[in-house]
Amino acid sequence: MAGWFPRFLLTLSSLILAVGGVMHAAAYGKAVAAITESNLPVFFGSALKAFWLGDSATMILLAAIYGWIAVRPRAAAKSVVVLLAFLPASTAVLLYAFFGAFFAAHMLLAAAVLTFAAGLQFPVFGHEPIVGEPS
């Protein structure tokens, strides 16, 4: 049975991703300025802009999904929550590979570990009663 602790872990993960997504989106202007000053072909500059905002949107959407599951744990089974942990984990691995020890990678890894730990405590099929949730 999942109790308050996995919900807390998901809430914390959600907050980390929301803050990260907003910080990333706020830096978009600097990214655009750097792209404009570079000699990148237009296609690659446009792709970088799209990926920049896409990464911000992904973090904010994941934050919303994690928050929803924290509020309504019956919305997702153990396997779904565990699999959702791999989204920020995979981005963290890529950041470590290309940037090294970068604070954004640390934030994403923390969100992934918290989500994975929460998922391990969820019911297998999502049908078992959840402690503290009204029927």
Image (cartoon, rainbow, N blue to C red):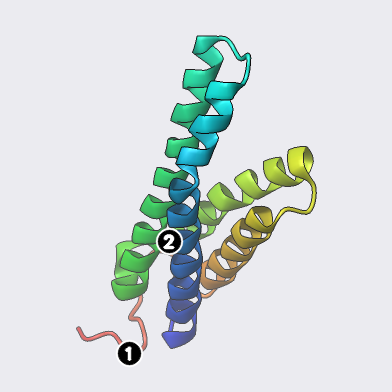
With respect to residue 36, does 109 lie above or below? below
Which circle's residue, 1 or 2, is located before the other in the chain?
2
Question: Label 2 crowding class (10 Å Cα cut-off): few <14, some 14-19, many 20+?
Answer: many
Q: Quadrant of residue 75?
A: bottom left
Q: Quadrant of the N terminus?
A: bottom left
Q: Could you tell me the amino acid type at mark 1? A: Gly
Element type at mark 1: loop
Q: Nearer the viewer, residue 118 or 111?
A: 111
Residue 18 is tagged as 2
In this view, which residue lies farthest toward the bottom? 132
Residue 31 appears in view = yes
Residue 53 occupies which quadrant of the picture? top left
Q: Residue at x 52, y 75 (%)?
A: 121
* Disc 1 from disc 2: Cα separation: 25 Å
Expressed as whole percent of the image width and height from the top left, the position of residue 24 reads 50, 49
Instruction: Please determine whether, in this image, residue 121 is positioned above or below residue 100.
Output: below
Q: Which residue is mark 1?
A: 132
Kind of residue sitting beneath label 2: Ala
Q: Is residue 122 visible?
A: no
- Picture residue at 69% right of the left edge, 44% below the top: 95
Q: Is 70 on the left or on the right of 52, as rendered?
A: left
Q: Looking at the image, is 133 positioned above or below residue 105?
A: below
What residue appears at the point 47 percent right and 20 percent down from the top-left corner? 46
Percent coordinates x, y for residue 107 in the rendering: 61, 61
Question: Where in the figure is residue 23, as x and y percent of width and height?
Answer: 48, 55
Nearest-to-viewer mark from 1 and 2: 2
SS of the residue at dot 2? helix
Mark 1 burial class by Cα count in 10 Å: few <14, some 14-19, many 20+: few
